[in-house]
Image (spheres, rainbow, N blue to C red):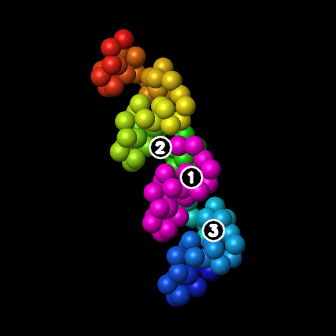
């Protein structure tokens, strides 16, 4: 199916639609990571998260990177990440192994 997609100049999204498959199924069939699917399908990781009904935390786990990397990839602050993944700044401090003072400095907050 990969060859068919290449020869016919079809995207994996088109292949998924033709065969009534989800992108997850396509990824599994083609032995691709979700990152590869995102790249091939010209989707952002946010779109992938939405399509697969995953939280950004799940995406971070699947792709084996930290929430800091997620924040960087999406060009959003750690506060936004905390809000999006429904965790407190205390949790953020714990995840990143930093003190709340550091968190306050990063976020320009007063304690």
- Decide whether residue 43 is among the magenta residues: yes
Residue at image mark 1: 50
The answer to whether 33 is drawn above or below residue 11 in the figure is above
User: Which quadrant of the figure has residue 27?
Assistant: bottom right
Q: Position of residue 87 (x, y in %)?
A: 53, 28
The reply to whether dot 2 and dot 1 touch (C-beta < 8 Å) is no
Q: Position of residue 57 (x, y in %)?
A: 55, 40
- Decide whether residue 45 is among the magenta residues: yes
Residue at image mark 2: 65
Label 1 or label 3, whichever lies nearer to me, is 1
Q: Position of residue 49 (x, y in %)?
A: 55, 51
Q: CA distance from mark 1 to mark 3?
A: 16 Å
Magenta residues (range): 34-56
Q: Residue at x 55, y 31 (%)?
A: 86
Q: Residue lying furthest top in this view? A: 111
- Callout 2: SS: loop
In the displayed structure, does residue 104 sit left or right of residue 49?
Answer: left
């Amino acid at each position: 199916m990969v060859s068919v997609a290449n020869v016919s100049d079809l995207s994996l999204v088109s292949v998924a639609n033709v065969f009534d498959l989800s992108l997850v199924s396509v990824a599994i069939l083609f032995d691709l990571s979700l990152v590869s699917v995102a790249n091939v399908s010209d989707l952002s990781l946010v779109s992938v998260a939405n399509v697969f009904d995953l939280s950004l935390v799940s995406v971070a786990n699947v792709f084996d990177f930290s929430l800091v990397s997620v924040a960087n990839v999406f060009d959003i602050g750690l506060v936004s990440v905390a809000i999006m993944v429904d965790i407190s700044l205390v949790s953020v401090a714990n995840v990143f192994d930093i003190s709340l003072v550091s968190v306050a400095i990063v976020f320009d907050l007063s304690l």
